[in-house]
Amino acid sequence: MYGVRLFVPGTAATTAQWQGSLARAGLTLDGRVLTADSLGFDALVEWVENDGSFGQAFGYGTMSPAEQHAVAGAGSALVLDLPVYLGAAAADVATLIAALGDAGALGVRLEQSKLGWPVEEWIRALQGDDPRMLYRCAVVVLQDRDGLRSCGMHAFGLPDAQVEASPLEANRLLGSLNVYQLAEDPVLVSGDSFTPDRETPRRRLERWPDDGYPSDSVCHNPFGVWRLGAEGGAADSRGDLRPVFVPALVAVLAAAEEKAGRALRRDEVERLTGEGSCMMMTHADAKSLERGRGYADLEPELAWAQWQVVRASRD
């Protein structure tokens, strides 16, 4: 399982050339594994031939024309899967990207959001203490059928967010909520409410599975999406503990559906939800379990509706 996937075009045209340039930068590429004494993790690597699309992959206004032209003429690229999240491992990822730059990298694209920047921009964002700068580098806001939504927060092990509002207000709300997640790593649950300031009406939060991308897409967020409700939404009361399905309810339903060889009926989903084995945990412990597992579970009260979203993303 990876937390971050990077697309790195460079001057090297072959795997052997990459190995040589990486070695001079203090990195060792042995088969498909990239290691370094200075890193707290190993990365899985895939070599990619330049098929003529590299320049277009960095064509979102994040590079100068000269930088984009250099990427278009890259010798080849490496795709790196890192078993970490950007927030917790920001220093190590910055060290890795700096070494890749020394090895001839012409840019780095975060595959979760498809945002690519020059090496120096990534280093500044990862080494700085400004979560807004890191958010700008790593997360994109897109228009979809239900308003605006962010994409890329799963690179931090966090949910994305979506809201129906004017583009200006939606960008402000999504940016505020997501930067708050990056800066504070708060323990949020469905039923909480959020506002970026005292003047803005609060909106109720509800977490849903990501319906923006198929589950096998690198852009799919396995931690789900915060749906911000209408203005004036009140928060639900919550206790100190919450029930956590063990195994995860979404895994139980998937196994039951595979065994049945057909889609589960609503009464079957509700029965399995009601009979599921749970542990009582603090909200913080439940969040830690989820992040370690690598995906969010369904909300029990919304199990039927959310299971339909999960099923649709797998079709």
Image (cartoon, rainbow, N blue to C red):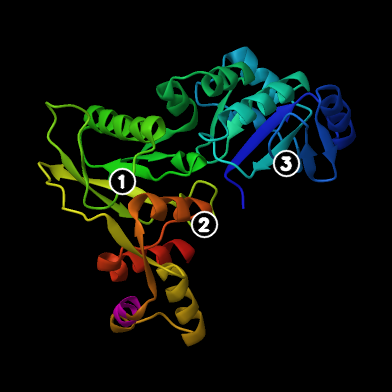
| CB contact under 8 Å: marks 1 and 3 | no
Disc 1/disc 3 C-alpha distance (Å): 31 Å
User: In the image, what residue type sits under mark 2?
Assistant: Arg
Residue 113 placement (x, y as % from top left)? 50, 38
Q: Residue at x 38, y 81 (%)?
A: 264
Instruction: Say which residue label 2 marks.
Output: 293
User: In the image, what residue type sits under mark 1?
Assistant: Leu
Q: Earlier in the sequence, mark 1 or mark 2?
A: 1
From the viewer's perspective, tell me whether residue 23 is left or right of residue 192.
right
| CB contact under 8 Å: marks 3 and 2 | no
Residue 294 placement (x, y as % from top left)? 51, 54
Residue 32 placement (x, y as % from top left)? 80, 45
Label 1 Cα crowd, 10 Å radius (few <14 / some 14-19 / many 20+): some
Q: Nearer the viewer, residue 243 or 124?
A: 243
Q: Spot the residue most to the bottom.
A: 260
Instruction: Say which residue label 3 marks.
Output: 42
Image-quadrant location for residue 135: top left
Image-quadrant location for residue 161: top left
Q: Secondary structure at mark 1?
A: loop
The stretch in magenta equals 269-274
Magenta portion: prevailing SS class? helix
Instruction: Say which residue label 1 marks.
Output: 188
Image-quadrant location for residue 29: top right
